[in-house]
Image (tube, rainbow, N blue to C red):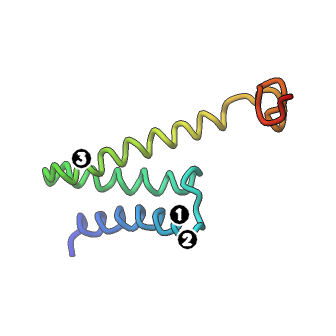
């Protein structure tokens, strides 16, 4: 087995770990660990697909990478955003606690 084969297996295992964790309800697909597993795994496989000129696989993994990156960026933005209106989203925000 060569290094690219090992790297490919690691990338696949990262994605599969996230998938299995979500299916077994051990990982929340909207939280950091799941998103990082998907992003890193898909990015690794995207690079290998590009090097091998495997266009279908590159399309699949490229989109997977882009969606994972966008989801992760959204999560990080929400974490950094200042809290608005109170602890439970009360009346000031029109949230669940609004009258």
Which mark lies nearer to you, 2 or 3?
Answer: 2
Under tag 3, what secondary structure?
helix
Q: Is residue 45 above or below residue 70?
A: below
Q: Which residue is found at the position 16% from the left and 49% from the top?
A: 55
Q: Residue at x 48, y 69 (%)?
A: 20
- Quadrant in which residue 90 is drawn: top right
Determine which of the numbered discs, if any, sits on residue 59 in the image.
3
Residue 27, quarter of the rendered image: bottom right
Real-space Cα distance between discs 1 and 3? 23 Å
* Sequence-wise first label, 1 or 3: 1
The C terminus - image quarter: top right
Q: Secondary structure at mark 1?
A: helix
Label 2, on which residue? 24
The CA span between labels 2 and 3 is 28 Å
Among all residues in the image, which is located at the extreme top?
Answer: 92
* Residue that numbered label 1 is attached to: 22
């Amino acid at each position: 087995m060569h290094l690219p084969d090992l790297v490919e297996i690691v990338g696949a295992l990262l994605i599969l770990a996230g998938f299995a964790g979500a299916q077994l309800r051990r990982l929340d697909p909207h939280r950091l660990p799941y998103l990082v597993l998907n992003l890193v795994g898909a990015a690794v496989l995207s690079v290998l697909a590009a090097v091998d000129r495997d266009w279908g696989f590159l399309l699949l993994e490229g989109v997977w990478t882009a969606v994972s990156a966008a989801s992760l960026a959204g999560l990080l933005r929400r974490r950094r955003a200042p809290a608005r209106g109170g602890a439970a989203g009360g009346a000031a925000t029109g949230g669940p606690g609004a009258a």
